[in-house]
């Protein structure tokens, strides 16, 4: 997938790449003329009666060539290096889009720091490969070939071959070192991901760290990861730093050979002094591109290591079929669960075992049960975060597999257990960055969720900026903003997944009363630990170990004297004691 993205990008921008390569060839070939012109000038000046106009012409030629090289180099760098920046943005956008499609199962197995490393370090390494590294390799190759051509054609074949003898050693050495660089860079990326994850986790959990006086242990853990990073980086640096000295030694040998052999050829009048000076110029010209080969190999090996990592992500297919090509009538909100069983991919135990129940349109259903009884799993399957393994879920008497995924999720307003808020204004958190809602819509939703007065109490009201994950709000305030975000959609199906746990019982009562008034004709699912949150529901389902143990209204379940009865008396006896 990543290869296809890069190939398509290059095809789409092929004109710019072609023009860039033409400009690069122009710059490389024209600058190869300068040593020959300098050599000719020196030969002209050896004659006591040399023509000054010829010398002046050569000077103008050199100035003209220099200007042409400058303009051509400026052009190709902007086109090729500039496009590599666009490629970086394109890859990052595709990666982010791919992240949006992957299921929770993928994120359960990955660390956040590792995913950040993919999006930043790995994509940057790929950019360096398909931008500066490729450009330098082509440029270096053309300069070397043109310089060697002029050395052979204008100076001497034998001198050229003898002086370039050390270069094959450089090529073989660089290829061997390059493989080691790729392996060691991969290790660096893995260690970087571990450090990113550690820092992020520590910042998110800093209150817990301080509460349990674990600062020293956290510092020790970070130091260990940091030392691993330092070690892997130094190993890579040690490997890559060998390249340049070896190249310089080989070129030093080449220069010594050129001085000994070339100088002797000048003395024997086999070549002119100007040709000898031109030869030295070409040898110097070759040195920089060959030195660049070390950098090119380092960048390419890093890029290849990162490309392998990115391929692994891009080749991870979403497990959920979106079916966005299907057309279906609007959703009304009637839901049916038929013989539904489900086991999470990372577990051997069934989270749900053969459950069946109906939710008529306009009804409110309460779901209660112990932690791990399968309450949230029902919602995960209804939202198609996971595929059902056994049984079927129907909306309006049609399997959810026959609906476009977008339609299902657009018709549902979810308030999850962890009320995630973005680091932006309260208004944006309620509207979820959509411009379709008026200020009245926002105020109405916040009043229904009983957060309106709290928002007005902030200095900037609805435009108050929240900290990361709403850190500057209480748990109850975060939950009520999340409820407002769901209510502003006026969804056909509203789901409250234990989303009133952080509010006091009086506020809970007001919110639920408000919901009963505004959602008379809409379907509502309330998952809760508190009996008070579900006692007015049309039907209450009691789950235990993935199975439905009891089902009925509040009064019916109390009369049965079963699990619900026990939960009710346990909670209300605690309230009496309190």
Image (cartoon, rainbow, N blue to C red):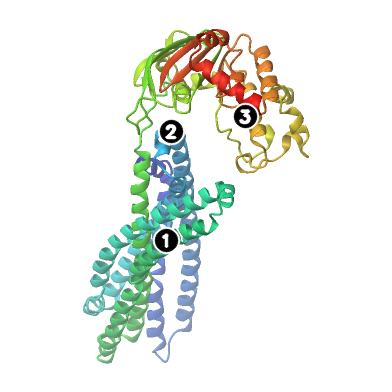
- Residue beneath the point at 41% across and 56% down: 191
Percent coordinates x, y for residue 297 in the rendering: 34, 62
User: Would you call the spot at circle 3 few (<14 residues within 10 Å), some (14-19), or many (20 or more)?
Assistant: many
289 or 262: nearer the viewer:
289
- Residue 576: numbered disc: none
* Secondary element at tag 3: helix
340 or 48: nearer the viewer:
340
Q: Is residue 172 left or right of residue 422?
A: left
Q: Is residue 343 above or below residue 362?
A: below
226 or 77: nearer the viewer:
226
Q: Is residue 477 left or right of residue 361?
A: right
- Residue 482: numbered disc: 3
On the image, which quarter does residue 374 sit in?
Answer: top left
Earlier-in-chain disc, 2 versus 3: 2
Percent coordinates x, y for residue 537 in the rendering: 58, 12
Residues at marks 3 and 1, CA–CA distance in whole angstroms: 40 Å
Label 1 sits on residue: 229
Residues at marks 2 and 3, CA–CA distance in whole angstroms: 20 Å
Residues at marks 2 and 1, CA–CA distance in whole angstroms: 29 Å
Q: Is residue 385 left or right of residue 483?
A: left
Label 2 sits on residue: 104
């Amino acid at each position: 997938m990543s290869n296809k993205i890069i190939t398509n990008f290059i095809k789409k921008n092929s004109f710019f790449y072609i023009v860039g390569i033409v400009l690069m060839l122009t710059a490389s070939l024209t600058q190869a003329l300068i040593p020959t012109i300098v050599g000719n000038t020196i030969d002209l000046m050896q004659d006591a009666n040399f023509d000054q106009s010829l010398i002046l012409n050569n000077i103008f030629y050199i100035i003209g060539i220099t200007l042409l090289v400058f303009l051509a180099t400026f052009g190709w760098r902007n086109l090729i290096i500039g496009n590599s920046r666009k490629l970086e943005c394109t890859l990052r956008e595709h990666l982010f889009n791919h992240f949006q499609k992957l299921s929770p199962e993928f994120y359960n197995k990955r660390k956040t720091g590792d995913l950040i490393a993919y999006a930043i370090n790995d994509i940057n390494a790929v950019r360096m490969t398909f931008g500066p590294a490729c450009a330098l390799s082509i440029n270096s190759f053309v300069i070397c070939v043109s310089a060697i051509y002029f050395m052979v054609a204008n100076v001497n074949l034998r001198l050229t071959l003898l002086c370039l003898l050390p270069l094959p050693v450089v090529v073989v050495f660089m290829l061997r070192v390059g493989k080691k660089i790729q392996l060691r860079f991969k290790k660096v990326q893995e260690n970087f991901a571990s450090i990113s994850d550690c820092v992020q986790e520590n910042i998110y959990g800093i209150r817990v760290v301080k509460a349990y006086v674990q600062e020293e242990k956290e510092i020790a853990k970070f130091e260990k990861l940091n030392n691993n990073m330092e070690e892997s980086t130094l190993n890579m640096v040690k490997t890559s730093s060998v390249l340049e000295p070896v190249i310089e030694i080989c070129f030093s040998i080449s220069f010594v050979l050129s001085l000994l052999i070339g100088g002797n050829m000048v003395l024997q009048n086999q070549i002119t002094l100007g040709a000898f000076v031109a030869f030295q110029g070409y040898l110097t010209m070759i040195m920089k591109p060959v030195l660049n080969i070390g950098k090119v190999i380092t960048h390419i090996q890093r890029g290849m290591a990162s490309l392998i990592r990115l391929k692994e992500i891009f080749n991870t297919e979403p497990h959920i079929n979106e079916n966005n090509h299907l057309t279906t009538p609007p959703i009304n909100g009637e839901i049916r669960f038929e013989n539904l069983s489900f086991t999470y991919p990372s577990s051997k135990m069934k989270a749900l075992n053969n459950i069946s129940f109906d939710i008529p349109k306009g009804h409110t259903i309460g779901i209660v049960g112990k932690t791990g009884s399968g309450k949230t799993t029902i919602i995960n399957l209804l939202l198609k975060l996971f595929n059902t393994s056994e049984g079927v879920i129907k909306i309006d008497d049609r399997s959810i597999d026959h609906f476009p995924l977008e339609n299902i999720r657009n018709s549902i307003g979810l308030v999850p257990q962890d009320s995630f808020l973005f680091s932006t204004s309260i208004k944006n958190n309620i509207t979820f960055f959509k411009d379709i809602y008026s200020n009245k819509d926002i105020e109405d939703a916040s009043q229904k969720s009983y957060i309106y007065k709290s928002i007005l109490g902030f200095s900037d009201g609805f435009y108050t900026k929240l900290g990361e994950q709403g850190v500057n709000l209480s748990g109850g305030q975060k939950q009520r903003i999340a409820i407002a975000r769901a209510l502003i959609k006026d969804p056909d199906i509203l789901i409250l997944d234990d989303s009133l746990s952080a509010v006091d019982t009086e506020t809970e009562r007001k919110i639920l009363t408000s919901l009963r008034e505004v959602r008379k004709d809409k379907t509502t699912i309330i998952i809760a630990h508190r009996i008070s949150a579900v006692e007015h529901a049309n039907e209450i389902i009691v789950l235990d170990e993935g199975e439905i143990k009891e089902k009925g209204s509040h009064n019916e379940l109390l009369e049965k004297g079963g699990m619900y009865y026990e939960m009710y008396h346990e909670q209300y006896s605690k309230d009496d004691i309190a």
